[in-house]
Amino acid sequence: MDEIAGATATSVARVFDLHALKAFAADKRVRKMLFKTEQLWSEIACYEPGQSTVMHTHPREEEAIYVLEGTATMSIAGEEVVVPAGAIVQFPASVPHDVRNLGADRCVIMFLKVNPKVLKAGADGAGA
């Protein structure tokens, strides 16, 4: 099992201290991989005021973004959404979105994505 600073391991799980993993840079947002398995992956992204992630889509993956600290402003399919700390946003694949820190304080998000093959396999087995 890979060791990541800020993570501890039990015999079957890893526990991540997201606050200990935070890191910031003056020139651009900082992303840190938490884990990536065959089914699920997650990262945190840390934004200084004024930093952002450009508009993009994930053609195959559903995504959930949790705001750990600060406030994230997102454009999701053209709709402006202000997401405060403690809130989570879930959206399906292929939805255009961005993340911007328009506030005066730092912003930290954690996102989760599911392998699209897992989603398809789950749909194929639904109701069986």
Image (spheres, rainbow, N blue to C red):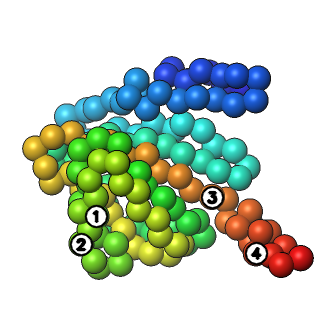
The residue under label 3 is 114
Q: Earlier in the sequence, mark 3 or mark 4?
A: 3
Q: How many marks?
A: 4
**Which quadrant would the N terminus be assigned to in this image?**
top right
Residue 64 as seen in the image, left or right of residue 52: right
Q: Is residue 54 above or below residue 1?
A: below
Q: Position of residue 106 (x, y in %)?
A: 21, 39
| Residue at the disc numbered 2 | 80
Sequence-wise, the earlier of marks 2 and 4 is 2
Q: Are marks 2 and 3 in contact (CB under 8 Å)?
A: no
Q: Is residue 122 left or right of residue 111?
A: right
* Residue 82 x, y percent position in the rendering: 23, 62
Q: Label 1, on which residue?
A: 74
Instruction: Give whichever of discs 1 and 3 has the lower sequence position.
Output: 1
User: Is residue 52 visible from the viewing direction of this image?
Assistant: no
The disc labelled 4 sits on which kind of residue?
Answer: Ala
- Disc 3 or disc 4, which is closer to the eye? 4
In the rendered image, which residue does mark 4 sit on? 123
Q: Residue at x 25, y 32 (%)?
A: 25
